[in-house]
Amino acid sequence: MKCYLAEDLLQNYIDGLLRKETEEELQDHLQQCSNCQQLHAQLIAAPQTVLEVSQNKQSLGLWKKFKRRMTRRTTYSIIIITAVLLVCAYFFAIGTLTKSKNFIYEAKVIGELWQIDMDITNGMSLLPLTETLYGEENEFGSKPIIGHIIKPKQLVPSPLLESGNSGFLFGVSLHHFANPDYKVIVRLADQDIIFMKENLE
Ligand SMILES: [Zn+2]
């Protein structure tokens, strides 16, 4: 075998890619040729090869880390989505309007504030949803506030929230009641309780 041929084959020989006959011819040549022996030794110890191996190891490590991180992120996402769904279900799906027999309240004027203190008495949690009622558009192009509607919803007490959510305080500025149309409606399952200028308490 000629040297140039042996040189071309050496890397494949090291990588074990040569067919048996070629390999034996190359081995014969290596035993006779100190130049090719030297080249063979250099290729085996070549820093380039070492570098490639360590780079491969590194990228393998990065890939593992990336995979691990993705898995963790997916887990977090699932936990967060589940929590959000639970809270949504808790606030909007499970709640029903409280019945008047389970509902007590105290309305009073404190300074410039009108407020109503509400409690539920059947062991459920209380979450009033409030909406603002608007009147017809006036000459200034804005719709005046003519009321607030409070919907005291009762909810199954949730382990997600602290216990003792049976009370709720709602307040509006007293000046709303100067408008004769303004009212606060507390909407229960079986009746409306309406507060106006004439009956603030
Ligand atoms: Zn040679």
Image: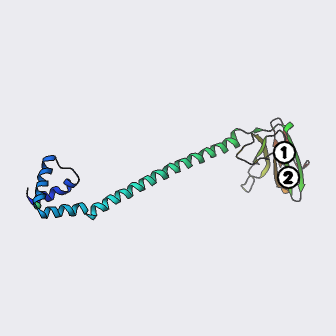
Residue at horizontal 87 percent and vertical 45 percent from the top: 105
Q: Nearer the viewer, residue 121 or 162?
A: 162
Which label number is shown at residue 115? 2
Q: Nearer the viewer, residue 142 or 60?
A: 60
User: Residue 87's quadrant in the figure?
Assistant: top right
**Residue at position x 17%, y 64% in the image:** 38
Mark 2 element type? strand
Query: Vertically, is 76 above or below 37?
Result: above
Mark 1 Cβ inside 8 Å of ligand 1: no
Q: How many marks?
A: 2
Which residue type carries mark 1? Answer: Asp
- Image position, residue 186 (x, y; %): 82, 43
Label disc, if present, on residue 93 of the rendered structure: none
Quarter holding residue 40: bottom left
Q: Is residue 90 left or right of residue 2?
A: right
Q: Residue at x 86, y 43 (%)?
A: 194
* Residue type at the position of mark 2: Gln
- Disc 2 + disc 1, Cβ < 8 Å: no
Q: Nearer the viewer, residue 72 or 39?
A: 39
Task: Depth check: give the residue in front, 141 or 163.
Answer: 163
Image location of residue 182, percent across then percent down: 83, 49
Per the image, the residue denoted by label 1 is 119
For the residues labelled 2 and 1, the Cα–Cα distance comes to: 13 Å
| Image x and y of residue 54, in percent | 34, 60
Q: Residue at x 85, y 49 (%)?
A: 117
Q: Counting other residues with Cα less than 10 Å from the Cα at mark 1, is it few (<14), some (14-19), or many (20 or more)?
A: many
Q: Relative to residue 58, is residue 156 depicted above or below?
A: above
Q: Quadrant of ligand 1?
A: bottom left
- Between disc 2 and disc 1, the foreground one is 1
